[in-house]
Image (cartoon, rainbow, N blue to C red):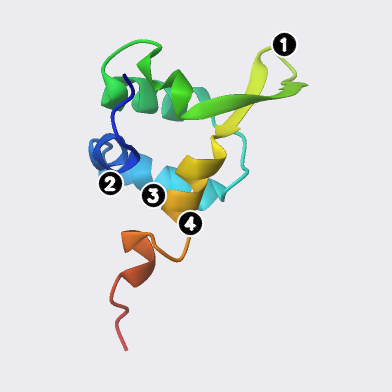
């Protein structure tokens, strides 16, 4: 059973989390971020439910993957706790 989105994303390092945010909701995930999601979800391959293939491939032949729509919605949507971060004046 897949852990909930907030729990899994909460297990990422600040750098990994910022990396996801920097890519935007439909950015292709580099290997280090898919590996980070796998780790946060429980181990090798465990994060596959949190990212999905786009149907295209990279120059090296590997599939491009993006965050699943509900994961991207949580991370970038209005309900995301990240969107409520206090900004310095």
**Residue 78 lies in what quarter of the image?**
bottom left
Tags 4 and 2 touching, CB below 8 Å: no
Task: Give the SS element for disc 4.
Answer: helix
Determine the residue positioned at 30% across, 24% down.
41
Tags 3 and 4 touching, CB below 8 Å: no
Image quadrant where one finds the N terminus: top left
Tell me which label, 1 or 3, sits earlier in the chain: 3
Q: What residue does disc 1 label?
A: 61
Count neighbours of disc 4 (C-alpha within 10 A) and say few if under 14, some if 14 to 19, many if 20 or more: some
Q: What residue does disc 3 label?
A: 18
Tags 1 and 3 touching, CB below 8 Å: no
Image quadrant where one finds the C terminus: bottom left
Tags 2 and 3 touching, CB below 8 Å: yes
Q: Is residue 35 above or below residue 25?
A: above
Tags 1 and 4 touching, CB below 8 Å: no
Determine the residue positioned at 66% across, 13% down.
62
Tell me which label, 1 or 2, sits earlier in the chain: 2
Residue 70 image offset from top left, x and y in percent? 50, 43
Q: What residue does disc 4 label?
A: 76
Tell me which label, 1 or 4, sits earlier in the chain: 1
Count neighbours of disc 2 (C-alpha within 10 A) and say few if under 14, some if 14 to 19, many if 20 or more: few
Task: Give the SS element for disc 1.
Answer: loop
């Amino acid at each position: 059973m897949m852990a909930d989105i907030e729990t899994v994303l909460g297990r990422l390092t600040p750098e990994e989390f910022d990396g996801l945010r920097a890519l935007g909701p439909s950015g292709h995930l580099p290997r280090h971020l898919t590996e980070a999601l796998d780790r946060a979800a429980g181990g090798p391959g465990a994060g596959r439910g949190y990212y999905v293939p786009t149907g295209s491939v990279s120059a090296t032949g590997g599939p491009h993957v993006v965050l699943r729509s509900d994961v991207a919605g949580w991370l970038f949507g209005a309900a995301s706790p990240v969107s409520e971060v206090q900004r310095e004046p």
